[in-house]
Amino acid sequence: MRFAVELKGQADTLANVAPCFQGDIARIVIRDDRWFLESSAFDGCTNGGQVFPIADNILGLIHRICYLYTRLLAPFTIGYVQPLNETGAPLGRVLRASDTVNVYSSRGIEELRDSRGSQTLGTETLTRALEDQEVRVALALIGENDVEWPRIYDIVEFLGPETIVENKWATRKTVRRLRQTANHYRHLGRPQNNRLPPDPPSLQESISLVLDLLKKWMSRTQMR
């Protein structure tokens, strides 16, 4: 028996994101106007109850990858597990449902769709996250909610200010300005001890910068 997991979300978003995840570990497909997540990770399951936690884990990683590249925030939810026979015909349903709406970066979608040999960047990143603890930690720092100042600070610390500068991902002045601003806002209870720089970046500017830095780190780890 095989399984596919229904994905619920905006139809146009699913249509745009689906080509980003096309590989054995995660493949998003459409059948009869419904979208499904297929994965080789489901192969050892014998019932829908076993599939759900695996699908939740994979979908959580897909959400973080989407946010990293496109600013798309948790776009999908799991609807139901669809058991299939050997010919791909449906056998029944295990229901679970929800809905969501999001706005995202079309440029980031194009990045995730980029072919890397036999798979897309989206699938390659997901595969690495499932195999590499350090990549999972990096994606966990993003979370599934919009990034705020404390997480901006944590991401800079994870990457390492010196590593950022040494790799020429940003100047020392830019990193100092970003880190000092994030540190100020995460310590609002004692602002006098954690002052803002003279020209602090906005939250949106900081989010864009820190995600760009994290993508550069991901790109570097892919070449190891």
Image (spheres, rainbow, N blue to C red):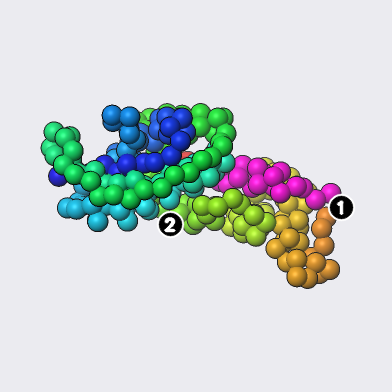
Kind of residue sitting beneath label 2: Gln
Q: Residue at x 61, y 57 (%)?
A: 151
Residue 133 visible, this orientation: yes
Residue 83 vs residue 173, the one in the foreground: 83
Mark 2 sits on what residue?
Answer: 133
The region drawn magenta spans 199-217
Task: Give neighbour class at mark 1: few <14, some 14-19, many 20+ (Cα, 10 Å).
Answer: few
Q: Secondary structure at mark 2?
A: helix
The answer to whether any part of residue 219 appears in the image is no
The residue carrying mark 1 is 198
Q: Position of residue 195 (x, y in %)?
A: 82, 62
Residue in the foreground of this view, choosing between 137 and 45: 45
- State the residue at coordinates (39%, 36%): 21
Q: Quadrant of the N terminus?
A: top left
Residue 209: horizontal and vertical position, in percent?
A: 67, 44
Q: State left or right for residue 142 relative to residue 183.
A: left
The quadrant where residue 28 appears: top left
What label does residue 184 carry, if any? none
The reply, left or right, for residue 142 in relation to residue 55 is: right
